[in-house]
Image (cartoon, coloured by chain):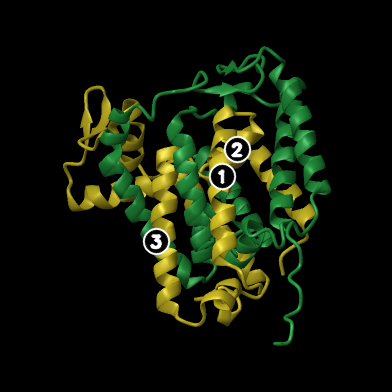
Amino acid sequence: MTTILLAIVIGAAFGAVLDRVGASNPTYIGKMLNLTNVNLAKSILLAIGTGSVLMFGGQMAGIVDVGHMSVKTAYAGVFIGGLMLGAGWAIAGYCPGTGVVAAASGRKDALFFIAGGLLGAAAYMATYPAWKASGLLDKIAGGKVTLGTVPGAEYEGLTAMPGDLMGIVLGLCFIALAFALPERLVPQKAAPQPAE
Amino acid sequence: MSINWKAGGLLLGLVFFLAVLLVKPIGVSTQFVILDGIIADTVNPGLVTQTEEGVTSTNAYLAKSGGKYAKAVADPLNYSFVFVLAMALGGLASAKLRGGIPQGDRSIPALWRANFGDSTAKRYAAAFLGGFIVLYGARLAGGCTSGHMMSGMMQTAVSGYIFAAGAFAAAIPVSMIMFKQEA
């Protein structure tokens, strides 16, 4: 029962923050991805950095259970799937989580996104054996690995460097990048010139 | 109104940290499969079955990794599925508290309108197609923006970096080609 309660509390908080940060607004996603206003990317970088510093700092202080980490397998399909997700994210302006939040908050186009998503997930379920047979789901670079070796974790490190310390340093890099990134990455369009 | 990027990023980071502190890293896209499984198992009750070794399925994807997806389909009242339902409630409450989504933005977001006009059919078709590609890709990759990119990179997972590289390598050019007019 406690886990269900936690699911409700953390899930609701996540949904609310996604709404407030603008991640469930396709216009904000579009402006980030066409590089005309990357404030949302700055939020994402700051979030990854904050989460990383707190989690690895908490592990070093003995407050955070290392066993709560859950590292996914690396395989070629991760990159191919990433390309597909990126293309669809740009077209629709939604990813799975923000699509759910958007639909709930009253965006009708997000309902079509979810319907398409359910069909896409079903299509993957049906075609999974072919991907499995292709070898593109076979692990690469050691599979479930972290960049450094995290003390006490069940995952191997790509390098022997202390993974917790590395996590904090990388987290700080993400935070620094969030602050360093200018709001706009492409030049402002010149005002339209009168016809000759 | 949305909040500034610093407050937003900090709050988002705190939520990701709380999740891993109290339970496990956040992920969403698997639950599309679980909902598909629930629907399909209702239509075709033989899809998910209880065996002596646990729950399994006639679908190879639901049956993989010791039937963990099949188990979630058989018992949807689990952490990850309820988490996504709660996200919807949180998003709804937050949007209501700031006055709701503006009427004009509910079917066609402003940036889309500036580039592709007022056809709701066109917008809905694009959202549907985008949804299909996003979830097919997320399941192929084994995670989405939440699970791979944010939770993954936060944990220094190699897979998270591979995913993020792929996602932005496609998303940025597609967006720059599609959305030339600014809103």
Q: Is residue A192 left or right of residue B94?
A: right
Residue A3 shows in the view: yes
In x, y percent, where is residue A154? 55, 16
- Kind of residue at badge 1: Ser
Q: Are circles 2 and 1 on residues that touch, CB within 8 Å?
A: yes
In x, y percent, where is residue B61? 30, 36
Tell me what residue is drawn at x 79 percent, y 53 percent: B6
State the green chain: A
Give residue B146's mark.
1
Tell me what residue is drawn at x 75 percent, y 39 percent: A174
Label 3 CA crowd tier, 10 Å (few <14, some 14–19, many 20+):
many
- Kind of residue at badge 3: Leu
Q: Is residue A102 left or right of residue B21?
A: left
**Quarter assignment of residue B177:** bottom right
- Kind of residue at badge 2: Ser
- First in sequence: mark 2 or mark 1? 1
Disc 3: which residue: B129
In x, y percent, where is residue A156? 57, 15
- First in sequence: mark 3 or mark 2? 3
Q: Do the dots labelled 3 and 2 sit on one chain?
A: yes
Q: Do the dots labelled 3 and 1 sit on one chain?
A: yes
Disc 2: which residue: B151
Of circles 3 and 2, the one toward us is 3
